[in-house]
Every structure is written in C-alpha cells, then in structure tokens.
Image: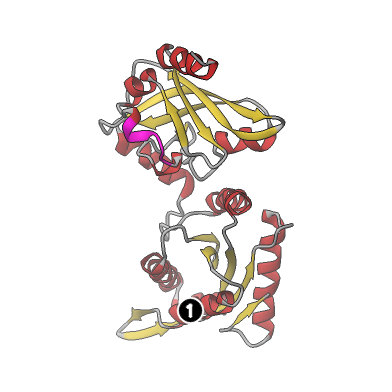
Amino acid sequence: MEWKQIYREILSEVSDGVYIVDSHRKILFWNKAAERITGYSAEEIMGEHCSETGLHHIDMHGEPLCELGCPLITATETGRVQQESVFVRHKGGYRVPIETRVFPVYDDGVNVGAVEIFRPASGRVYDDHFIEQLSDAATRDPLTNLPNRRYMQDYLRYKLYASRQFGEMFAVLFGDVDDFHQFNNTYGHDAGDSVLRNISRTFQENLRAGDRVARWGGEEFVGVFAVESEAAVPVLGQKICQLVRNTEIDHAGHPLHVTMSIGITLMRPEDTVETMLARADALMYESKRKGKDCVTAG
C-alpha cells in the first residue's frame, strides 16, 4: 500500500473533521468526521470550490469568510498556520460553532494547497437566520442595504488574490453623486436618503454574479466588476453613469434626478487595494473637473 493511501485512511478515521484543498481552494479530501459535523457527504463536497458549497463560513464577528479574510487564503499566502473560531452552516440548515486550524501544504517549496482541521466548539447549535443577521449587521449599510466600506475593503483583497491565482480581470469604480449637499439643502435629507436608496436598488438589480457595489460613505459608492478587456472598462462606467442619471424619486408629485461623477480603472499586476482605490478616486475627481455627470477611465 502506498504511503499516500495510508495517510488518507488514517485521516479518514480521525475524530476531527479534516479537509484538503488545492491552491485554487477546490476540495480534494473530506473525511468521515467532516461528514458527521456538517451533514455533507464527501460525494456532495469533493471537487467543489469551497466558496461554492453550502458551508458558508462566518466568523464570530459576522464576517463571511469565503470572500472576506478566508483563512485558507491567508495560510497559503503567508505560509503560517491560521486558527479561527467560526460558524459553519450544517446541511440541516442550522449553524454549528467550530474551532479550525489551517495548515499550508508545500511540494518542493511550492504551495499546492492547504489542510483544515476542525471540531465543534460546543454542543450548542444556532439558528441560521440569527447568524445571517449577524453577518448583515457587520457588512451591510443600513440605509441602502448595500455592502459597506469594511466589506468592500476585504472583498478587494480577495479579488486581488483571485485575480493573481486565476488570471481574472476586474475593474474598480469610484462614484460620487454630484451636488448632493445642495440637493439635501433644497429638498431635505429624506429626499436625499430616498435618492441613495433608489440608486442602490438600481445597482442591485443590474449586477452580475461576482460584481459588487458598496456604499463607501455619504454619497460615495465603490464597485468591483469583472471585465473581459480593457476596452470594456469605460463602457461599463458609462452604463453605471446612465443608470444613475435615469434613476428618479417622486417629491411632492415631481420627479427628481441626480447625476454621478465616475472614475474607473482596470486592476494592474502591481496593484494593492490602496493603489486601486486611490487611482479610481483621482479619476472620479477628474470627472468632477470636466463638468460632472461623466466617466473618466484610466
């Protein structure tokens, strides 16, 4: 019997849950204890990307870890063991608190994946709706129901990692509603809040899978969008600009509109979260200087 097969048989029988992923976070191994703790069989889990399973890890502060602060990504990027206390969604629809340890795996000095070992933190289980509410409170803007600034900062870090792993292109958009202070002074803050909610609803109804728009603060929005080419970047910005221009609210029987100045940029190989945001922000201010209600790409 080969040593690899011996190791797999040993790991299959240990009392802690064990699963192994490759460098793309595709699940290669899922032991019997993992089946018992989560309710998911190996046949249901193996071959899936971990973020595409029903496990939906959330940490104790409400952060959804599959996109924000994934310990598997951190372990492979840093080469250090990661320890987390998280909630995992059981197949039965409830949440189980677990303690996890994640170990990076190397072959001849090259990272080839990670191993996660986990066990229940207690015998108690939690209502899934309560945990989802906890997650929403940590990552959602209460006025617009869009992701908040904290979420977007972490999501951009995840997208940078995914882009370098899989070669996916994406653009970062920074948008600011034009003359919003004047709008609030003229029509009142309730009207201003209604405009922000309607713009946010428009964004939500026009996003593709994997795209995100967050309320960055005040009347500012940041978006992350998958693109297939550099030529698609300004076209995408124009689409968002037009969507905002055509969003309206009713105020005392009269329709009100606002516009948005937009900066949009393609992710570059040397980028960090900070450089992408700074470049998109500078491009947005260039749109302000050009007369507002327009897009500057770069």
Whether residue 185 is visible? no
**SS under mark 1:** helix
Whether residue 13 is visible? yes
Circle 1 is placed at which residue position?
Answer: 239
Q: Is residue 220 left or right of residue 242?
A: right
The boundaries of the magenta stretch are 43-48
> Extreme right residue here?
270
The quadrant of the picture occupied by the C terminus is bottom right
- Residue 164 position, x and y percent, is 63, 52
Of residues 257 and 96, the one nearer the viewer is 96
Q: Residue at x 54, y 69 (%)?
A: 228
- Residue 83 position, x and y percent, is 57, 24
Q: Residue at x 71, y 71 (%)?
A: 282
Q: Is residue 277 left or right of residue 155?
A: right
In the image, residue 290 sits, relative to residue 225, either above or below, namely: below
Of residues 102 and 46, the one nearer the viewer is 46
Magenta-span inclusion, residue 46? yes
Q: Residue at x 47, y 44 (%)?
A: 138
- What amino acid type should be assigned to the residue bearing mark 1? Lys
Q: Is residue 297 left or right of residue 127?
A: right
Within 10 angstroms of label 1, few (less than 14), some, or many (20 or more) residues?
few
Q: Is residue 56 left or right of residue 163?
A: left
In the image, residue 278 sits, relative to residue 118, either above or below, namely: below
- Residue 293 position, x and y percent, is 56, 84
Q: Residue at x 56, y 34 (%)?
A: 72
> Extreme left residue here?
92
- Residue 25 position, x and y percent, is 51, 39
